[in-house]
Structures are given as C-alpha cells and as structure tokens.
Image (cartoon, grey):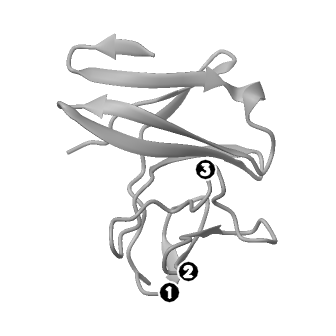
Amino acid sequence: MRVVSDRVEWRTSAAAIPPGGAVTFTLRCGGRAVAGFLIHWRGGYHAYANRCPHRGTPLDLWPGEFFTADGTALICATHGAVFDPATGRCTSGPCAGDALTPLPLRREGADLVVGCPTP
C-alpha cells in the first residue's frame, strides 16, 4: 500500500489473481474505510466496492467468494442479486438497474493498483 495525501492505494501482482479469481482489500479514503474486491474475469481485471446497492451488505458470504457457481456473474450472497462482472450492473434481483461502485484500477508493470472511488 502507498499513501497519496489522504488517500491510500492498494496494489497486488496481477499474477496473484488467477482467471476467475478474486481478492478482497480495504482502502482508507477520506478518513473512512472502503472494503473492495478485485476480480480477474475473461482476461480483464475489475475492481468494485464490496457493497451491494440493495442493502449495503458485502457481496461475499465467505471471503473472496463473488462468482456464481458457473463463474459467469457476480452474486450477492445476502439477497441473490446478480451482477455483470465487466460493468458491475445488476442484471437481476432486488437491485436490478443499479450497479456496484467501480473503483479506479490501473496497471503498473506487473502490478494492479486500486484507488479510492471518485466522490
């Protein structure tokens, strides 16, 4: 982790997340903790706040378990809402039409760096 003014960035090696894998982390953003997760899906990486737009609960019931059984979508363990992994849009369930909060993600060499959400 690296502090940039009041903002903390989280980083990991891209090789540490296998295809279909996920990892959780916590950022310090503007004096508050923001739980997040990073997924490796269909050759790309995506980062989101770990907060369902329906009730604000974390998506994963067990740490790092975000994908449906067939690995094609993200699922909220609390209410069963289903999300598109590439966009974070809720495609079915109690939050249909809403979306997960994306977190800024960039690649620096072999590393992935996640930042705080934009206000």
Residue in the picture at 49% in, 80% down: 79
**Residue 44 image offset from top left, x and y in percent:** 69, 45
Q: Which sits earlier in the primary sequence, circle 3 or circle 1? A: 3
For residue 43, side relative to residue 1 (left or right): right
* Circle 2 residue: 80
Residue 52, position in %: x, y? 41, 66
Type of the residue with mark 3? Pro
Q: Nearer the viewer, mark 2 or mark 1?
A: 2
Give the CA distance from mark 2 to mark 1. 6 Å
Mark 3, other Cα within 10 Å: few <14 / some 14–19 / many ≥20? few
Image side of residue 110 versus residue 46, left or right: right
Residue 76 x, y percent position in the rendering: 53, 70
Task: Report which quarter residue 91 is drawn in.
Answer: bottom right
Return the disc, 2 or 1, that comes first in the chain's sequence.
Answer: 2
The residue labelled by disc 3 is 63
Q: Nearer the viewer, residue 57 or 102?
A: 57
> What amino acid type is highlighted by mark number 2?
Gly
Q: Is residue 42 left or right of residue 4?
A: right
Location of the C terminus by quadrant is: top left
Closest to the camera, between mark 3 and mark 1, is 3
